[in-house]
Image (cartoon, rainbow, N blue to C red):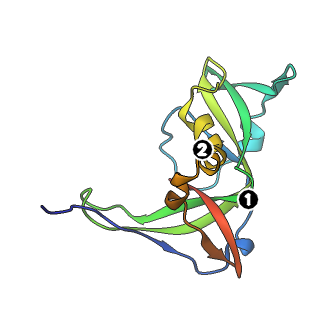
Amino acid sequence: MSCNASVTRVQLKSPVGQAPRVPVHLMPCEIEHEGPAQVSQYLTATTKNSKQEKTVSFRGRRLKGQELSCPQGFTGLVLKEINKPGSDQEDRTVKLSSVFDKLTYWNLETPPNSDDTVVMAMDWPELAEAVGPFKAFFRKARVTGVMKELFILIY
């Protein structure tokens, strides 16, 4: 039996603590743009009610969002793919672009809820810790001399 696993290599040219801390928006669409964007100028959300539900219009479509914090003890990484592989079996190389502690998760027309995979992912480390046997799935990384969990977003 053969294994067609690929490897993702992360290039860290400087410590994670020195990476720029940026606001992160997870959109329900693909945007054909790479590089900086004037998000604060064009994506200004209004906050409604006590649930901290946000609404915004993006290219004429109504989006509803919620700010999600990374799980306790985790740091979010935004990684940029250096070169796209030609197939799923080829190795990938990514570099650290920025870091975050929270992100705004957007849905098209309906607010995020506990059934959304991104919302569930933020709860997974706490659940796994409670269950116990799943601890083996979490790997710690040495970040600037301190052991720290990482939450990774690759774009």
Secondary structure state at the residue bearing disc 2? helix
Q: Picture quarter containing residue 22?
A: bottom right
The residue at the point 54 percent across, 34 percent down is 117
Q: In this orientation, does residue 154 appear?
A: no
Secondary structure state at the residue bearing disc 1? loop
Q: CA distance from mark 1 to mark 2?
A: 13 Å
User: Residue 149 location in percent, x, y?
Assistant: 64, 63
Q: Earlier in the sequence, mark 1 or mark 2?
A: 1
The amino acid type of the residue labelled 1 equals Gly
Work out whether residue 29 or residue 34 is closer to the camera in this orientation and state it.
29
User: Residue 110 location in percent, x, y?
Assistant: 62, 18
User: Residue 72 location in percent, x, y?
Assistant: 74, 53
Residue marked by disc 1: 73
Q: Picture quarter containing residue 50?
A: top right
The amino acid type of the residue labelled 2 equals Trp
Residue marked by disc 2: 124
The residue at the point 69 percent across, 58 percent down is 74
The residue at the point 70 percent across, 50 percent down is 71
